[in-house]
Amino acid sequence: MTLFIPDLEPQERSTPSPDAVLVPGWLTLDQQAWIVRQFHSWTQGPVPIRAAKVRGHEMSVRTVCLGWHWQPYKYTREATDVNGARVLPFPDWMIRLGRRALHEAGYPETEAGAYTPDAALVNYYDENARLGMHQDRDERSLAPVVSLSIGDSCTFRFGNTENRGKPYANLLLRSGDLFVFGGASRLAYHGVTRIHPLTAPDGCGLDSGRINITMRTTGLAG
């Protein structure tokens, strides 16, 4: 995709913990708006966007999946908890974008070039949505997770690998930001404590709320 030509300007970055890297403003407004258009297409199905239930409680975040359908504690090809339809395929352009993201985050060239995510959770947060502290451990692979933010800013809490409490860092993720976590931080607890309404920049394609894409490598076959 010509939209995803790397920016030649150096990016500021921060490292809240080992192997966790925040790159602000990584996606241009045009790239963000293009992804938002894809998001609206994805939500039309075959598996519609929905709020998953965790231990009987409906999440405030709504999710549509690519490649593999995530339901709490497992991945399936068919959305057996929604309508039984097969999930949309994982797009090739997202694999290329994931590899570029790892390269930008400073991961070794060999790891970035071999990165082949096969699932994406595309979450939509309205201004009241939250995401409790959790680990991404339903995958068999511990390849890095690539996270992209579009729309309203959020307070993202990135913690430690042992428990949901301190130490943790509260990060402000803005529209266009890239966050990658792998290696020593791959199983760090993390969550979203607040959405900041009316912070989506003009031109990002989203008037309100926040879209977050997390690419993962499931390690599953079939």
Image (tube, grey):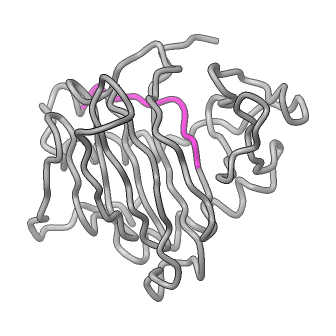
Q: Quadrant of residue 187?
A: top left
Going by the image, does 174 lie left or right of 120? left
Per the image, is 111 magenta?
no
Instruction: Decide which of 102, 123 is in the foreground and name it.
Output: 123
Residue at the right extreme of this rendering = 83
Which is nearer the eye, 96 or 135?
135
Q: Is residue 24 left or right of residue 59?
A: left
Quarter of the picture holding the N terminus: bottom left
| View extreme (bottom): residue | 202
Q: Quadrant of residue 114?
A: top left
Tell me residue 183's x, y (percent): 22, 25
Up the image or down, 4 lies above or below 160; here it is: below
Residue at the image position 24 percent from the left and 50 percent from the top: 169
Question: In percent of the image, x 42 and y 39: which residue is there?
Answer: 95
Viewer-nearest residue: 172 or 78: 172
State which region is magenta: 113-122
Q: Residue at x 58, y 49 (%)?
A: 122
Relative to 23, does residue 90 appear above or below in the rendering? Answer: above
Above/below status of 134 relative to 152: above
Q: Position of residue 132 (x, y in %)?
A: 52, 43
Q: Is residue 13 left or right of residue 69?
A: left
Give residue 92's position: percent from left, percent from top.
50, 41
127 or 84, nearer to the observer: 127
The quarter of the picture where the C terminus appears is top right
Indicate the quadrant where residue 113 lies.
top left
Q: Position of residue 46 (x, y in %)?
A: 83, 44
How many marks overall? 0
